[in-house]
Image (spheres, rainbow, N blue to C red):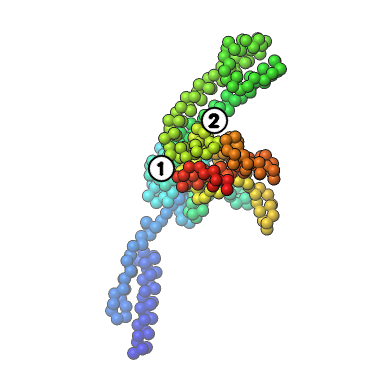
Amino acid sequence: MSSQNEELNTRLQLNVCALIENHLAGLPTAALTGDGVKVSLPNRFNRKEAIMNYSGIDLHSNNSVVSVIDETDRVVAEKRLPNDLAKILAFLAPWQAELAGVVVESTYNWYWLVDGLQAAGFVVHLANTTAIKKYEGLKHSGDETDARYLAHLLRLGILPTGTILPAKHREVRDLARKRMQLVRSRTTHILAVENITARQCGTRITSNQVKQLDQTAVDQLHLPDDVALAVRANVAVIMTLSAQIAIVEKRLQEKVVPHADYALLTTVPGIGQTLATVIVLETGTIERFASAGNFASYARCVDSQRMSNGKKKGEGNTRNGNPYLSWAFIEAANFSMRFSTEARQFYERKKARTNPVVARKALAHKLARACFHMLKERKPFDVTRCFA
């Protein structure tokens, strides 16, 4: 009797193994055991549904190379297309149902392509190009291999990606960046007037005095005709830029002031309207940062070094991060030393052990971490907690 049971169990195990193999292969999964009992597995596996494709787009200024690969890295379709959204969508349309995602290279002109693909229903990933390093031993590489490599990384699940902020948010953020560009341009002309007056009169006028100059005031400086013409040109540009900066700042205040994060950031000593606006718009949602260290690193407020066996072997990409946030927190550090005794004392302690540049950067790092916790916990600035 026992031998019969053992034989029955063996046959049952073999049948079950065969059923599993058929199930994975998409074949019929029903059979009879030795005692006439029907054993079956639900045939939910569909080989056609399991096939997934991956697309990579190598984006250039006037054309793009679009590549589609399958699960074995075989190129299914590939073509160089002009930067025309309709043509790119038409090329990808036959594989849209099977595409796991489309990878777009994070270049300066990705907005139109990413927004268009998302609107068409594609799952889009923005590749962080600074974090992608190709094998240097390749004999040949080109736009096609770059597009395939982006799709290859997506297939493996190791694609470094950047955050795709909503289009409305990007519009306001870029307006704030335009304001910075205008301010820097105005500063160039202000310095030019200061230098001219220093050369011609022996004394330098302040930037606020330059901003108040008009054509009549220039005539009163009694400069040589050609020099006066140069100053009038600078003053005319300064007046125009000042008017445009005022218009942009008014629009930014309308868009950003109602934001809850803006009110929290203005509780930090040294962060006023302009810096709070930049930090809110450049940060986006704070949830995209896993920790305060990640946020501080994104703001370029941490050191960059390559360590091995406890020894420094070099430095990494020190410029990796957001330059606008870096500027904002350095400016916040400068202003906080004026308005906060605790910030000033922290700076002085650091400067005594290092130097002014490192001390200022350390203070900016402190403020960046404080802002992260404020935005994460929805609490105003706590000076004791920051400088404890």
Q: Is residue 6 visible?
A: yes
Element under disc 1 = helix
Element under disc 2 = helix
Q: Which residue is mark 1?
A: 118
The answer for how far apart the CA atoms under marks 1 and 2 are is 30 Å
Q: Nearer the viewer, mark 1 or mark 2?
A: 2
Residue 68, given in percent of the width and then of the height, sits at: 46, 48
Q: Mark 2 packing: few (<14 Cα in 10 Å), some, or many (20+)?
A: some
Residue nearest the observer in this picture, 59 or 141? 59
Image quadrant in which the N terminus is located:
bottom left
Residue 336, given in percent of the width and then of the height, sits at: 58, 37
Query: Of the residues shown, which amino acid type is indicated by label 2?
Result: Met
Q: Residue at x 50, y 50 (%)?
A: 290
Query: Of the residues shown, which amino acid type is indicated by label 1?
Result: Gln
Q: Residue at x 32, y 78 (%)?
A: 33
Residue nearest the observer in this picture, 37 or 286? 286
Q: Is residue 73 visible?
A: no
Residue nearest the observer in this picture, 148 or 111? 111
Q: Residue at x 32, y 66 (%)?
A: 42
Q: Which residue is mark 2?
A: 180
Q: Residue at x 41, y 39 (%)?
A: 116
